[in-house]
Amino acid sequence: MHDIIVIGGGTAGLTAAIYARRAAKTVLVIEAKACGGQIISTPSIENYPAAPGISGFDYATKLCGQAEALGAEFVYDRVTGLKDGDPKTVIGEKAEYTGRAVIIATGSENRKLGLPDEERLTGRGVSYCATCDGARFRGKRVAVNGGGNTALEDALYLSDLADTVYLIHRRDAFRADPSTVSLVLARGNVKPVLNSRVTGLVADRRLRAVRVTSAGGEETEIAVDGLFVAIGREPGNRFAEGLADIDQAGYIVAGEDCRTKTPGLFAAGDCRTKELRQLVTAAADGAVAADGASKYIASLAGA
Ligand code: NAP
């Protein structure tokens, strides 16, 4: 048994682990994929205080190393369930883990288009990470789908590599920062395809084209070798249902104190309801949740 179980090894989870270890609590971090979280694939972080330009990979490596050096333990498993009690039980695909307090810091996952063959073609032309896979499309034709900061930054990055970048967005205006939009639209090889949705993937073994349907219902095919889907992210918190309220979009209902409706169960970072999902707010949540968890454990000892 550990004092605190942290579910998720991204910025929120690892900051929680750091704060909890410094409060002399035993900590187990359960991570489904790779230590570091979604920021790993960001080429350059420009808005984290005092670390301008650090790559996501370097940042994540430092963060994981810091938590490990302080004595946090790590296990790689996908959490599927949670039981209340003292201790609480976290159910994974490989094992069950017990802890007196639990911090959920599961972040969010790439939203899928939900098209037939999307899963089969992932890695065969369909990608959710331009910085991971962009180099494979040097000199080729690609499409980016989305109108947020991720999509526009992906289009900018890919325009340096690919021959042509079709930027397909369902509305007539991008929601990304105006400065980024201006940079993208100044690139001669970026072709905006507005008021349009990707409605089909044309493929043999690999992706060959995307089918696009305009707001007026007109269907066209655009020949591409790659499609980068950047239509936002979705939390994966269903395992907490019952012990935590989950809002319609799938986020855990918790305030700035990161407390859920179950005493000793906290939600930190992108997985909880909040206004601004950024590295710095994820880190802040991690500290708050670890402090709350430590105080909860102290209250049990005093009971
Ligand atoms: P986002 O801001 O939520 O944008 C998602 C985009 O995808 C929107 O343009 C949305 O269209 C579109 N979309 C959503 N569902 C769709 C669907 N089913 N089919 C077609 N299009 C769909 O997501 P994001 O760009 O990944 O950014 C997430 C957060 O991280 C944001 O707060 C963003 O500002 C932040 N971020 C910051 C940076 C940075 O500061 N450098 C970089 C990346 C991300 P509508 O516009 O019509 O809703």
Image (cartoon, helix red, strand yellow):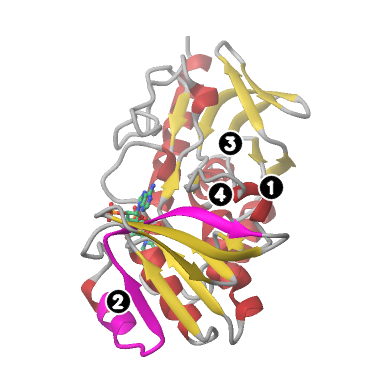
> Would you name the residue on which mark 1 appears?
71
Q: What's the residue type where badge 2 is placed?
A: Thr
What amino acid is labelled 1 in the image? Gly
In three-dimensional space, the C-alpha distance between marks 4 and 1, rounded to whole angstroms, equals 12 Å
Q: Residues within 10 Å of mark 2 (few under 14, many from 20)?
A: some
| Residue beneath disc 3 | 7
**Circle 4 residue:** 14
**Along the line of sight, the residue nearer the viewer: 156 or 241:** 156
> Mark 2, mark 3: which one is toward the viewer?
2
Which residue in the protein does label 2 denote?
180
Disc 3 residue type (three-letter): Ile
The residue drawn where x is 59% and y is 31% is 4
Locate residue 268: give its quadrant: top left
As helix, strand or loop, the secondary structure at mark 1 comes to loop
**186 is within the stretch colored magenta:** yes
Q: Is residue 157 above or below residue 202?
A: below
Residues shaded magenta: 180-203
Cβ atoms at labels 3 and 1 below 8 Å apart: no
Marks 2 and 4 in Cβ contact (< 8 Å) = no
Q: Position of residue 256 (x, y in %)?
A: 29, 37
Q: Name the N-terminal-most of marks 1 and 2.
A: 1
Of mark 4 and mark 3, the one earlier in the sequence is 3
Q: Are marks 1 and 2 in contact (CB under 8 Å)?
A: no
How many angstroms separate mark 2 from mark 3 (CA)?
A: 34 Å
* Marks 4 and 1 in Cβ contact (< 8 Å): no
Residue drawn 58% across and 36% down? 7
Which label lies toward us, 1 or 2? 2
Q: Is residue 98 left or right of residue 238?
A: right
* Residue in front for this viewpoint, 48 or 174: 174
Return the x and y of residue 209 as percentages of the image width and height: 55, 66
Query: The residue tagged with tag 2: helix, strand or loop?
Result: helix
- Marks 1 and 2, how far apart in space? 40 Å
